[in-house]
Amino acid sequence: MALPGAAYLGWHVASVRLQADPQSAERLRAEVARLREQLESAAGELEVLRTRSQVDRRALEMLRRDLAAKREEAAGLEEELRFYRSLMAPGEVAGGLSIREPELVAADSPGVYALRIVVQQEARRHELVRGELEIEITGSRDGERVSYPLRDLAEEPEENPLVLGFRYFQAIEARLRLPDGLEPSAITVQARFTKPDALQFRRRFDWRVRERFTHAGK
């Protein structure tokens, strides 16, 4: 701001002096030209500084994104490590079998969710597991309690019941589309095993939506 002001002042003084002393015209014109040159130089330096500032901000933002990605990657590896360690721990029920909490991730479309459920067996037992799984979504609609089997909500046809066959774990994935007006509250999983032993149990989980799937069981 000082430089444009100086240029204007020089021009103004030059105008007055030109009227009073025509012989000083060349010197005053040279002074005005010098001030204009300084102004252009300062404007160029300012643009350079602005560019550097933008580059610095961009570099900082890139670094922040890279750090966030590294943290997410590390968290995913920790999740996966905890999952495989859990395969070495005793199961929640007799026979070393357990069902992990269902993972729900909201899709882009309203009322659509991706569902993932992992059934696992402790790794000390290497026997083949055979059985079946039934999944049910419960909630309220128009003030009444309602429940829907997975096959009624899945966008793609699902077996009913879902067939299980694994040694360590098995991931069940489906894409759900909820009916209009349904307020889900829970997911109930009924598991029936025929091998290595006849066994059945039922687990109820709260409806809980998360931002993304974990890496565990992938």
Image (cartoon, rainbow, N blue to C red):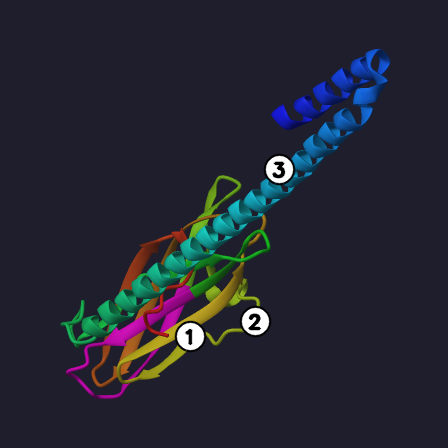
Q: Mark 1 points at which residue?
A: 161
Spatial CA span between label 3 and label 1: 76 Å
Nearest to the eye among marks 3 and 1: give it.
3
> Which three-letter amino acid code belongs to the residue tagged 2?
Glu
**Does residue 113 show up magenta in the picture?**
no
Magenta stretch prevailing secondary structure: strand
> In the image, residue 54 lies at what x, y percent?
54, 47
For the residues labelled 2 and 1, say whether their Cβ atoms are less than 8 Å apart.
Answer: no
Q: Which residue is drawn at 55% across and 53% down?
A: 111
SS for callout 2: loop
At mark 3, the secondary structure is: helix
The type of residue carrying mark 1 is Pro
Q: What stretch is highlighted in magenta?
A: 116-135
Q: Quadrant of the N terminus?
A: top right
- Identify the residue at image location x=74%, y=33%: 33
Residue 125 in percent (x, y) is at 17, 84
Q: Which of 8 and 217 is in front in this view?
A: 8
Circle 3 residue: 42
Give the class, few, some or many, for how many residues have Cα within 10 Å of label 1's Cα (few <14, many ≥20): some
